[in-house]
Amino acid sequence: MKVILGIGGGIAAYKAAELARALVEREMTVQVVMTRAAREFVRPLTFAALTGRKVITGMFDPDGAIEHIRLAQESDVLVVAPATANLLAKFAHGLADDFLSTLYLAFTGPVALAPAMNSNMWLHPATQANLETLRARGHHILDPEDGPLACGMTGPGRLADPLRIATFIQALAERRRDMEGETVLVTAGPTQEPLDPVRFISNRSSGKMGYALAEAAAARGARVILISGPVRLAAPPGVTLVRVRTASQMRAAVMEHFEQAGIIVKAAAVADYHLASVPAMKIKKTAARISLELDPTPDILAEVGRKKGSRLLIGFAAETENLVQEARRKLESKNCDMVVANLVGQEGTGFESDRNEVVLVLKTGEMVPLPAASKREIAGRIFDHALRLRLALAQ
Ligand code: PMT
């Protein structure tokens, strides 16, 4: 595995030495790239000694200006630690005025950014907006830790533990293609159930969890069919997107495609009720109270559960109470192999958030809590456990 370690100009640059060593100890080939500012903090010689490779320090090194293209093509992962506020801004806006920022634009593989800076700089809306852009681009942000900072302040901004970063990078590099040959079907987002030509019933699902799953599987080499309700997200690269609106359209799309898949993940928040007969004209406002009689929608998960054969079926459970108990009930009643249970109705996880906190309830009886993390990270962990579970079930 070949990893590019980009080092930005912050006091935490010295901790990048520990990271470089940890990556080398994990048998990775590490090519260090230092910005001019980084070299004010630590000398390239330190990294050359740790990695056994010449450190790249500029666009116009004797090796030639197209080095960044060759390096981008032959490397598996790009990690930048510390990623300064300036580097995050340059990456977010596509500025390419030195080797690292130019390499970033040429690199198409997974990118992990470990920011470190003063708390106010970290919390500044400009930095947070840049992070939002970079997350939306699919990059892994290894959030800084809280604690005393070199500037004398205490708060968020300390570089994440270098050993933690190394473990993450190793996992990222190793699992890159471990789903090659696999077809995965993912459902995502809400459904909209029309009440008349202009109104509908829906829910708060943004699609972020399902899209993160689709992206994670595609990044690991799987062919992915993503069946999505109406959301504002772009299809992840390489994924076949099937757009639907209602629960019955989602059912039809799932029934059409699920037989091609070995793993089916149902992260969509499908409406449980709909108006069976939708009026052709807008319902007129009058002074009178009206009531709507709603019918249940098709339970897609339960239907796939009946027809799945040896396919691995992963359902979700969105609960406001009795999380694990409800997840177990759904696991059994819908013949799932795994249920990903999340508490909803609270800020910071579940619906709409970029983060989630879940418990995996497995058919083997195991229960695996996954602490709060980005939906991207949770998605990766779900597939790690899914692949392991399939092996266990096959024995
Ligand atoms: O989209 P985000 O904003 O990122 O939010 C993510 C999420 C909270 C929507 C997601 O993590 C989640 O929990 N998705 C499942 C939501 C849901 O509908 O849960 P449920 O407990 O009501 O349904 C259980 C399972 O049955 C789900 O797998 C669901 O897809 C499926 N189902 C439900 C109803 C139905 N008619 N057909 C189904 O297949």
Image: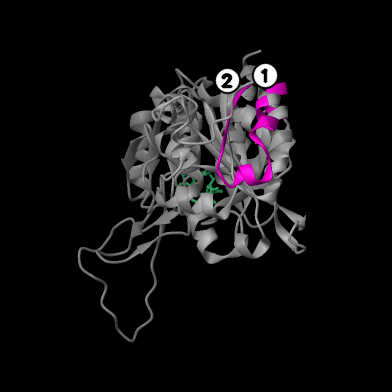
Instruction: Assess disc 1: are there few (<14), some (14-19) or many (≥20) residues with their C-alpha within 10 Å of its C-alpha.
Output: few
Tell me which residue sits at (67%, 19%) in the image. 27
- Identity of the residue furthest to the top in this view: 395
- Identity of the residue furthest to the left in this view: 281
Left or right: 255 as drawn, with respect to 128: left
Tell me which residue sits at (62%, 42%) in the image. 39
Residue 13 occupies quadrant: top right
Q: Which image quadrant: the N terminus?
A: top right
Instruction: Assess disc 2: are there few (<14), some (14-19) or many (≥20) residues with their C-alpha within 10 Å of its C-alpha.
Output: some
Q: Which image quadrant: the C terminus?
A: top right
Residue type indicated by callout 2: Met
Q: Which residues are magenta?
A: 22-48
What's the mark number on residue 27?
Answer: 1
Q: Position of residue 348 (x, y in %)?
A: 61, 59
> Which is nearer the eye, 336 or 102?
102
Q: CA distance from mark 1 to mark 2?
A: 8 Å
- Identity of the residue furthest to the bottom in this view: 287
The residue at which mark 2 appears reads as: 1
Q: Is label 1 in contact with label 2 (beta carbons under 8 Å)?
A: yes
Q: Position of residue 235 (x, y in %)?
A: 37, 42
> Which is nearer the eye, 74 or 187?
74
